[in-house]
Amino acid sequence: MKYSKDNLIFLPLGGSGEIGMNCNLYHYNNEWIMVDLGVTFHDNASSSNDLIMPDIDFITNNINKLSAIILTHAHEDHIGAVPYLYNKLGKLPIYTTAFTASVLKRKFASVGITDYEIILLEYGKELKIGSFIIKMFCMTHSIPEPSSVLIKTNKGNIFHTGDWKIDPQPLVGNPIEKKKLQEFLDGPIDVMVCDSTNVFDLKPSGSEGEVRENLKKIFFKKINGKIIITCFASNIARIETILKVSAEVNKSCLLLGRSLHKIYESAKENKYLLECNNIVSEKEAEIIPEDDLVIICTGSQGETRAALSRLINDKHKFLNINKKDIVIFSSREIPGNEKKINDVKAIVMKKGCEILDHTNSNVHVSGHPSKDELKEIYDWVAPDVLIPVHGEYRHLNEHINFAKKCGIKKQILVENGDMVRLNNDKTKEIISKIHSGKTILKGNKVINLEDKFINELKVISSDGEIFVNIIMNLNDELLADPIIFCPSILIDDLNKDELKTLIIDYINKLSEKTIFDDVLCNELKVIVRSFLKMKIGLKPLTFIEIVRI
């Protein structure tokens, strides 16, 4: 590595060059700290239900130099990997705010981890972690207590924004104020590491207060039938809006989905949603007239196991949807989920329901900054250098170009694995590239996406698999016909018998020669795969087992 122990370094392992899976490392004086450790969902190498996490081998190989994990907020793409990778990180102290800690504790409990250390941070209060001085500032976003992090060192000051927007009426939490932010920064900022998610949007993201007013109009007009509304479970302001607007029109609310219930528990634990008393249980909802019922459910991204999918596919024990109902998607599509969401909407349409979403009604506002908001924070923070994060390459590149137009002195386009030296006494630049990648959660095991097992899964999903068992004596003579097992391949008995004959003939030809079992296995694999490619057009993953008796 081309860095010395006194270098101030920024190194993203996730979230730079992609949406989600945020994980960032900072180094100074031979010590590292980690900011966020999140997940993303599904790519071409995984199934739709897999959790994908950063490959953190670089830092686990330097684990004695890692001092802490700092979590900016409780969204999955910022904290979702912590329970699965925490033991690899040596049970480090986790620094975060109370709401995020509450959500994280429930995540630890769900995977059976009880031995961890969470230290609560107070906004505006400086904390020394090794050679770093850390201070957190409350931003506005689509979840309680979204935090930016000021990282102060002798080699420079970094303002890491986390996820944010400028919301004049956030409803949960307070708006960001220029004066308060500048007082918090208390001096020049050398580098701002900044959210790029909505960099292509020109106009302000909008206020949560506007959504409340629009939902109020929709709820007042809806007299007959149920209101079914899906949103991100973590959007406490949106849930509060739905509960309060429902109460104003004398409707009861049912929460459907495990993640909603967990977030609701964390919210109450931190004194949010305490004034909302119109939530009913499923048993109570069964006897409430449909005209008086609002169902808040998970599944805004088209997840097949989420509450909305179960509801529209008639898999709930007593609830269903009908043409009198209205279904509201109070969320925005995460890139990559468009098809799944459209499939869900198609089923809803076939049921005859009215659908509202952000394309035809103002029922959602984003939690990320547009160009207008980025320009505003540039003026407030006045960084010397901008490093865009939280986006695909096109987002990062657009953010770089926009920052140039706005007069930021220097911009550095950084992708996962780029090691950036940020010393204020040297040129700020990328000095090295380390291996970065992805890991995947299969069951309770974390596996590298480049692992042979993952490649074999891809072959099985496309071409299937076949098992051939050969029983021979020590003289290389067959004692029984080959046993062929291929549950994932459509092959008729005639082709199977032909394959058996082909294997028998090949082994008989070798009966007068001495051949090692591993060589024989490899030869038979070629024969089996070539035969199946010719007969059924597939080259399955092939397993040959030789049993000697």
Image (cartoon, rainbow, N blue to C red):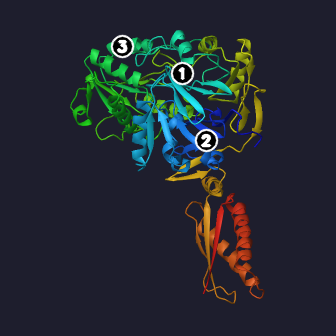
Q: CB under 8 Å between callouts 1 and 2?
A: no
Local packing at callout 2 (Cα closer than 10 Å; few below 14, some 14-19, many 20+) is few
Give the SS element for disc 2.
loop
- Tell me the residue at 67%/51% (across/down): 450
- Tell me the residue at 60%/69% (across/down): 467
Local packing at callout 3 (Cα closer than 10 Å; few below 14, some 14-19, many 20+) is some
Local packing at callout 1 (Cα closer than 10 Å; few below 14, some 14-19, many 20+) is many
Give the SS element for disc 3.
helix
Residue identified by numbered label 3 = 216
Name which residue type carries label 3: Lys
Residue 395 visible (yes or no): no
- Tell me the residue at 25%/32% (across/down): 285
Image coordinates of residue 21 in percent, x first then y, are: 58, 37
Residue identified by numbered label 2 = 43
Q: Could you tell me how far apart the alpha carbons at marks 1 and 3 are, in whole angstroms?
A: 26 Å
Q: Could you tell me how far apart the alpha carbons at marks 1 and 2 are, in whole angstroms?
A: 26 Å
Name which residue type carries label 1: Trp
- Look at the image and tell me in which quarter the N terminus lies: top right
- Look at the image and tell me in which quarter the C terminus lies: bottom right
Say which of 194 and 457 sits in front.
194
Q: Could you tell me how far apart the alpha carbons at marks 2 and 3 are, in whole angstroms?
A: 38 Å
Say which of 302 and 70 sits in front.
70
Say which of 536 and 529 sits in front.
529
Residue identified by numbered label 1 = 164
- Tell me the residue at 39%/35% (across/down): 102
> Which numbered disc flags the more N-terminal residue, 2 or 3?
2
Name which residue type carries label 2: Asp
Q: CB under 8 Å between callouts 2 and 3?
A: no
- Mark 1 or mark 3: which is in front? 1
Quarter of the image for residue 400 reads: top right
Image coordinates of residue 436 in percent, x first then y, are: 68, 43
